[in-house]
Amino acid sequence: MTMQKTTTSEKVATGAAQSKLILVGEHAVVHGQPAIALPFPLIGAESIVEKSRGQIYLDSSLYSGPMELAPSSLAGIVNTVKHTLKILQIPYRDLLIRIRSSIPPGKGLGSSASVAIAIVKSLFKYKEEKYTKEILLQLANICETYAHGAPSGIDPLTITSDRPIWYQKEKPVDYIDPKGNFHFVIADSGQMADTKTAVDTVKQMLKQAPQKMYKKIERIGDITYQVREALEKSSKQLLGYLLDEAQKELEALGVSDKSLNRLIEIAKSEGALGAKLTGGGNGGCIIALAENEHHSQLLSEKLLQYGAHNVWSYELKG
Ligand code: MEV
């Protein structure tokens, strides 16, 4: 649905946010295990707010029109906007919010949290008020509840960080200082991922076979501790092995799919040291560890050649 809106407003405020990658620990983090996530500045979201007479109007690639008529898929964003306006005591009208994003939505790269954070920042700037990290996280988590069902909170935390994070629910965030450089390739399977459904799938599996499934969740937790060591000791071979091990557990939890498994196979057959899904799974993206920068370029080309919809080479610098 698209309705064009033009303004002649002079008052404009913008907010921006990067995206994120989960290196290891997705899903297990919802159930109390630690996870490691990386800020991913190669793609991001921007929100531009301006004064415009009438009801609040959203303009984005997914929907353009009055905010009140936005589709249910945008309920998280709508509610984040409403709560932010309430906190800022801005009336629910006379605003145009333009959202521009280079993060593919529904691909496990934190699109919902990034858009929410960009919007909150832009509304605070519009009101000429300062925001704190706590308020950004609190408001972004409203959106995350719609996108993930029972969010761990890791996405907004990573998006507002400039360092890799170590996160375990209800514990203070810790930061990781990797030693050496790690070259990753992120490849998009082209399949939309629904994180909420994936989180629900794991919940169902836990209900059906609690003992067996909790073992898998705990195993992911163990792997996550070892991944931290591999990053801090600059051990690429070990990191690659651990990413493969994490993928086995994620497959057993029912959150990988054919499109991801295929990309992982291609990455491995082209010499990736390890590869797994990243984010919610069931579509979305994989993350593969390359030997070095040159190898990451080769891997990217191969993954594109064999059908990845998009690839990004990302160097984690120590
Ligand atoms: C999504 O990026 C990560 C999940 O673990 C969900 C969450 O932590 O909210 C799948």
Image: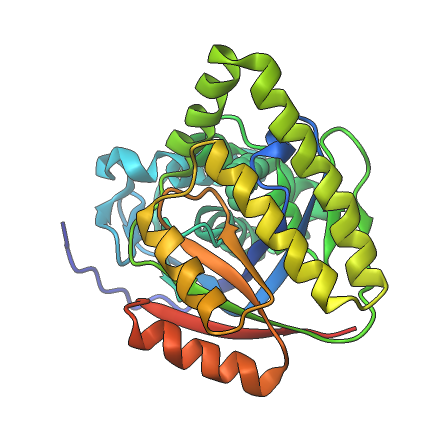
Q: Is residue 266 left or right of residue 88?
A: left
Visible residue check, residue 133 = yes
Residue 45 is situated, as x and y percent measured from the top left of the image, at 46, 62
Q: Quadrant of the C terminus?
A: bottom right
Above or below residue 271? Residue 217 is above
Residue 278 is situated, as x and y percent measured from the top left of the image, at 51, 51
Going 53% across and 42% down the picture, which residue do you hit? 248
Q: Nearer the viewer, residue 44 or 15?
A: 44
Residue 172 is situated, as x and y percent measured from the top left of the image, at 82, 38
Which residue in the rendered view is the most extreme toward the bottom?
Answer: 294
Structure colour scheme: rainbow
Above or below residue 96? Residue 217 is above
Going 53% across and 48% down the picture, which residue do you hit? 120
Going 41% across and 42% down the picture, which residue do you hit? 256
Q: Quadrant of ligand 1?
A: top right
Quadrant in which residue 26 is drawn: top right
Q: Nearer the viewer, residue 296 or 110?
A: 296
Above or below residue 243? Residue 205 is above
Quadrant in which residue 10 is drawn: bottom left
